[in-house]
Image (cartoon, helix red, strand yellow):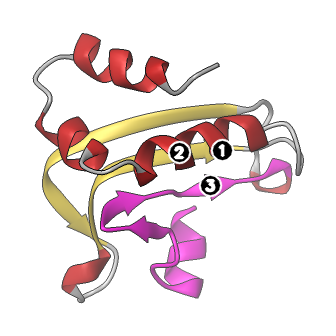
Amino acid sequence: MIKSVEELGPYIVIAPKVALPHARPEQGVNRVGMSMLRLKEPVYFSTKKQHGAQLIIVLAATDNETHLKALSQLSMMLSENDNIDKLIAMKTKQEMLALIEAYSN
């Protein structure tokens, strides 16, 4: 994932404050997975301010289809007004999980 950003630039910054690094089987993925890191201060994927992210959501995909449902639910959650800022501001893991579970079906 790091090599991809170094070669291709900050394409993983998918929304203000959100980065979605991802990998496929040929890059070492053995099973589908998703994890989220919330940062107090942004990490910048270039020198530009708009390439800063405080939510890093890593996606490991084993094929072109298995992860699509999770990605769709993630997209719905992130497209709702204020959810990104809410996730960044939440104090506990339980609060974050409750919001995420509200979009999981």
Q: CB atoms at circles 3 and 1 under 8 Å apart? A: no
Looking at the image, which is closer to me, 75 or 57?
A: 75
Residues shaded magenta: 1-25
Q: Which residue is at a point 31% across and 84% down the rendered structure image? A: 46
**Placement of 18 over or under 96, stated as above or below:** below
Q: Residue 7, image x and y in percent?
A: 58, 85
Estimate how packed mark 3 is, as few (under 14), some (14 to 19) or many (20 or more) residues with alpha carbons within 10 Å. Answer: some
What residue lies at 50% left-to-right and 57% top-to-bottom? 20
Placement of 52 over or under 50, stated as above or below: above
State the mark number for residue 72: 1
The CA span between labels 3 and 1 is: 15 Å
The amino acid pointed to by label 1 is Ser
The residue beneath circle 2 is: 76
N-terminal-most mark, 3 or 1: 3
Residue 92, given in percent of the width and then of the height, sits at 16, 17
- The N terminus sits in image quarter: bottom right
Query: What is the distance, in whole Å, between disc 3 and disc 2 at their CAs?
Result: 18 Å
User: Is 55 contained in the magenta span?
Assistant: no
User: Which residue lies under the disc numbered 3?
Assistant: 22
Neighbours of disc 1 within 10 Å: few (<14), some (14-19), many (20+): few
Q: Are marks 2 and 1 in contact (CB under 8 Å)?
A: yes
Cα–Cα gap, marks 2 and 1: 6 Å
Judging from the image, what secondary structure is the residue with disc 3 in?
Answer: strand
The quadrant of the image that shows the C terminus is top right
Residue visible at 60% across and 73% down in the picture: 4
Residue 53 falls left or right of residue 63: left
